[in-house]
Amino acid sequence: MSSALFSSSWYRVEQMRPALRGQARLVRHTYRGQRWHVLQDLASGRFLRLNEQAWRIVALLDGRRTLAEVWEQACLHLGDAAPTQDEILQLLTQLHQANVLLSDRRPDLDDLEQRRRKLGWARLKQYLGNPLSLKLPLLDPDRLLGVLARLMPRALLPWLGLAWLALVGSGLVGAAMHWQELSADITSRVFTAQNMLLLALAFPVLKAIHELGHGLALKLLGLSCHEMGLMFLVAVPVPYVDASQASALKSKYQRMLVGLAGMMAELAVASLALWLWVLVAPGVGKAFLHQVLIAAGVSTVIFNANPLLRFDGYYVLADWLEIPNLAQKSNQYLGHLINRHLFRVREGLQAPPLTPREAPWLLVYCIASFGYRMLVAVGIVLLVAPRFFFVGVLLALWSAWGTLGSPLLKQLKYLALSPVLQGRRALAWSLSMAFAGAAAAFIALVPLPSWTNAEGVIWMPEASRVRAAHACFGTRVLVTPGLPVRAGTPLLGCSDPELDAQQAQAEAKSAELASRLQHAQSVDRVQAQVVEAELRHARQRLADLEQRRAQLSIASPVDGIFVMPSPQDFPGRFAERGDHLAYVLEPRHYSLLTVVGQGEVDRVRSHTERVELRSVDNIDQLLAARLEREVPAATTQLPSLALALQGGGKIGLDPSAARQEPQALDSLFHFELRLLGEVLPKAVGQRVYVRFVHEPEPLARQWYRPLRQLFLKTFAS
């Protein structure tokens, strides 16, 4: 309440006899134990929320009492809690702007036209202030929703809720049962030209069902819905309905039901699509149903169900917390805390009315929603910019103004002109500049830990692989797999019928040449020298064949544990020269292969102080390692599928590449690390988190490098 009880402008309005319009509807709400009164203008659909004191004043506006009489009765009944004359004038202004106030004076047509233009400009300004979601009203869906509502008898509505629970529950069970098939090779199944076309067809239909769910819930609860159109979400047309009529519902659970109705309809469609996807044969229909599942899951989780954006989840959270205008109130509360505790404002500062345990929700929501909006805005700009450069730049500037520029300008204007800061303006400017300077100095000058994160896979050295020295047929396994062996121990026996024939032929040839040499030595010395040369060549060939025959018994290359997949299939199997047949594993000889992107490779090469590892199955255990060697050229080939998205990693595969060798979408550099210490991994092929620790540097340098690389990569021609 302001300190002045009387107003200098009161004489102008004290004889006015105001009343509420007949189109005004009253609804009583209870928020956190306090009663509030909501006035709705049925013509425009606008709402005005009044507390108990304000409603005491409004209830006296019957068109017969003058405003002076209304104030006198308010002072008589409310005592010290009675509003001042300025507060009553402010209340009348709000009623007038909400178009629910009628007076005995002649209407000012110019004022009505000015108010209409002001309302239109405010709506246009609201649309322009959010470049990522522009709305275009198209039609009135109330008649269609009425027809749909009449097709659903009210007696069946409770059973309809149970049917929805059963359907969505079965869909969740089905998704868990077929999760491997649903998520396998997700990138190549979604981000292809054909599947993206199917997604473009499925998304608007799914969103239309979503929005009709909101409208149908309103209709079933006795309200109306008079606006439906298109919302251009990142230049993509998406249907929407105006469900603001839900504010007229008394029960918060009914209001929450309206907010959840769209997601409920979407989840029901997704559940039906899942079971149809299971039943239909592979083809275009199955691919379309898969895209429906993707669209329903991503849009529901990231946008609709997220309370940090002003979509369905936001309104559901606000109703559940019983905090109307949650975003606006959280911003006001944060501003009040800054004025009171930072700028030390004591006079003229009115604290926002708060109920117990409301303040933590407001503070957390204000900070979290701002950060998430920034993240989503930057992500959407980077998504659009590579495909439409000019549009992407305009969208980036527009979003930067809406998320940073405009709020900053408002804060500067507040510091310069706000009467609340009277007498504290110099302190407010000094503290604001000091905090801004301290934050800039911290970001630009204070060294902080710096590192590069990557993923790797535990691998064995080449010496641990048991290979076929020559092409041969397997005969038997000489050592039971799983037993320790020493280097040189025979592991596998092979045979080569062609080699046997060649050896027998070489032995016969050598015996023949030995007989001819013995005869020539007694007859012709020149002929003897020729035969002797042939004999040496034949004996050399025989020695080579005997050496090859000895290699048919494949020995262990190193000490370790003999491991062989499917040893029962080895007898009779044909192996080419160099084929992998088995492994001899020794954890002390394991290495680690990791890949680093082109943007981070220079820092990993030149500025790495140490390397830290954490295995996926034991994230709390820190392993030591050192940088052993680097493959100097960039490549798209991955050392293991475990590093790809399909294997649980973070690297996307090129769907157009051959399936035999996994190919990454971007070029990568391979590094080999040598494990140190006594704690060693036990599983080959295990994925490991790798951190290359660099020298400390300020945040400005740490942020500048990836932003510059991201900009160059995004806008490169």
Image (cartoon, rainbow, N blue to C red):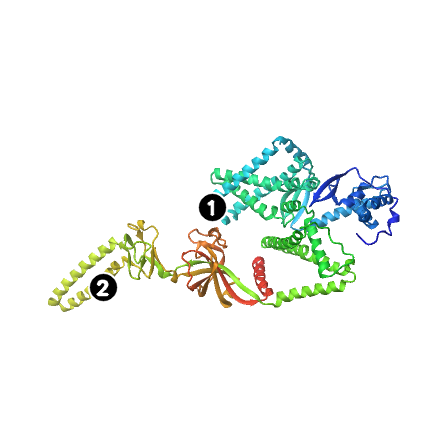
Would you place residue 338 above or below residue 40 in this image?
below
Would you place residue 429 above or below residue 203 in this image?
below
Question: Can residue 68 be spotted in the picture?
Answer: yes
In the structure shown, which secondary structural element does the residue marked by tag 1 occupy? helix
Residue at point 66% right, 33% down? 146
Position of residue 515 in the picture relative to residue 433 (left or right): left
Q: Amino acid at mark 1?
A: Gln
Disc 1 packing (10 Å; few <14; some 14–19; many ≥20): few
Name which quarter of the figure residue 239 lies in: top right
Residue wearing tag 2: 540
Q: Position of residue 405 (x, y in %)?
A: 69, 58
Question: Can residue 578 be spotted in the picture?
Answer: no
In the structure shown, which secondary structural element does the residue marked by tag 2 occupy? helix
Question: Which mark is nearer the camera, 1 or 2?
Answer: 1
From the viewer's side, name the closer residue of 512 and 29: 29
Residue at point 13% right, 62% down? 515
Which labelled disc corresponds to residue 512? none
Name which quarter of the figure residue 229 lies in: top right
Q: Position of residue 230 (x, y in %)?
A: 65, 43
Q: Circles 1 and 2: CB distance less than 8 Å?
A: no
Badge 1 or badge 2: first in the primary sequence: 1
Which quarter of the image is occupied by the C terminus?
A: bottom right
Position of residue 678 in the picture relative to residue 446 (left or right): left
From the viewer's side, name the closer residue of 153 and 58: 58
Would you place residue 501 above or below residue 444 in this image?
above
Residue wearing tag 1: 180
Residue lying at the far left in this picture: please name it. 522
From the viewer's side, name the closer residue of 608 and 36: 36
